[in-house]
């Protein structure tokens, strides 16, 4: 905790947030690992600016992480979730960079966080992983005409609009209606997970954000795009992380109230 003298106890609280991605998965080519590391650095810097202490954890390490050790959990982007996890097509040739250890680690983190009242934020793979964690399934490949990625080797992020529903956590952070996002994925939600609801979609109908259907079950938000990517509209990452960190801070019992 920081002690600034003139600030209140509540504003001094710096939540401890687990930031999870597969840092050294053997299935990831070097260039992909570098991209993930750069995105993680941007997310960590954003959390720091929002008033949180980020703890980066390596989901591919095989170490067992416990959600109760943190005040919130952020699941970042990465490789495809193993189709065997959701009864998908394990022979789909476009499925790549699968790391079953990371899948297991992050599913346990998500479920543990929700069960223990820790807020959860998911980005790209994070949304897909969360959907699978709640017994949903994925479309293994959106096809070569998909607007959600640029179809070339080592592609940059694509830009496209999404429509955000009113009365949602996402709308509270970014406002309702259309906003532009940066994305780079070839998979998407097929069957929506139990206890989740869709709160944003792309023009082609692809699910772009999900939340828990019942707000009293906790704070969970996942977006299919990369707000931490270069070229994202100004303020988008900051707004999402501020909402997340505020939720994490609110679950911390202020001093003197034990």
Image (cartoon, helix red, strand yellow):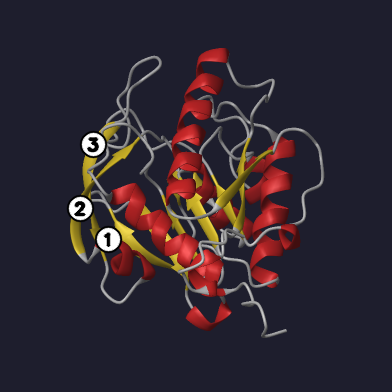
Q: Earlier in the sequence, mark 1 or mark 2?
A: 1
Q: Please name the residue that numbered disc 3 is placed on.
A: 159
Q: Where does label 1 land, which residue?
A: 174
Q: Quadrant of residue 153?
A: top left
- Between 186 and 157, which is closer to the camera in this rendering? 157
In this picture, residue 201 sits left or right of residue 246: left
Name the quadrant containing residue 253: bottom right
Judged left or right of residue 235, residue 103 is: right
Other residues around mark 1 within 10 Å, as few (<14) / some (14–19) / many (≥20): some
Label 1 and label 3: CA atoms lie apart by: 17 Å
Q: Count up the numbered dots.
A: 3
Q: Which residue is painted at 57% across and 78% down in the image?
A: 217
Which quadrant of the figure contains the C terminus?
bottom right
Q: Residue at x 68, y 58 (%)?
A: 70
Percent position of residue 156, x then y: 32, 23
> Residue at horizontal 54%, vertical 73%?
9
Q: Position of residue 214 (x, y in %)?
A: 50, 80
Above-or-below relation of 67 to 44: below
Q: Give the camera-side residue of 194 and 5.
A: 5
Asked whether, in this view, residue 184 is left or right of residue 128, the answer is left
Question: Mark number for residue 151?
Answer: none
Whether residue 23 appears in this view of the structure is yes
Pointer 3 with pointer 2, Cβ within 8 A = no
Label 3 residue SS: strand
CA–CA distance between discs 1 and 2?
A: 8 Å
Tag on residue 179?
2
Please report contact status of discs 1 and 2: CB closer than 8 Å, yes or no. Answer: yes
- Which sits in the foreground, 196 or 192? 196
């Amino acid at each position: 905790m920081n002690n600034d003298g003139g600030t209140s106890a509540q504003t001094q609280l710096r939540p401890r947030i687990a930031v999870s991605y597969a840092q050294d998965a053997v299935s990831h080519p070097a260039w992909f690992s570098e991209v993930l590391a750069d995105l993680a650095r941007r997310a960590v810097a954003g959390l720091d600016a929002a008033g949180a202490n980020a703890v980066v954890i390596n989901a591919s390490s095989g170490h067992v992480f416990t959600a109760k050790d943190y005040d919130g959990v952020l699941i970042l982007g990465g490789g495809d979730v193993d189709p065997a996890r959701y009864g998908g097509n394990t022979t789909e040739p476009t499925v790549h960079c699968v790391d079953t250890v990371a899948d297991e680690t992050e599913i346990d983190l998500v479920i543990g966080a929700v069960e223990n009242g820790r807020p959860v934020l998911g980005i790209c793979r994070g949304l897909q992983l969360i959907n699978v964690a709640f017994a949903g399934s994925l479309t293994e490949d959106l096809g070569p005409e998909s607007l959600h990625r640029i179809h070339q080797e080592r592609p940059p992020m694509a830009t496209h609009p999404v429509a955000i529903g009113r009365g949602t956590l996402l709308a509270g952070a970014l406002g309702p209606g259309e906003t532009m996002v940066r994305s780079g994925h070839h998979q998407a939600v097929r069957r929506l997970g139990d206890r989740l609801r869709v709160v944003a979609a792309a023009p082609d109908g692809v699910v772009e954000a999900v939340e828990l259907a019942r707000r009293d079950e906790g704070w969970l938000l996942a977006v299919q795009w990369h707000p931490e990517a270069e070229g994202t509209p100004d303020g988008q990452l900051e707004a999402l992380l501020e909402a997340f960190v505020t939720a994490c801070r609110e679950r911390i019992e202020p001093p003197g109230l034990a």
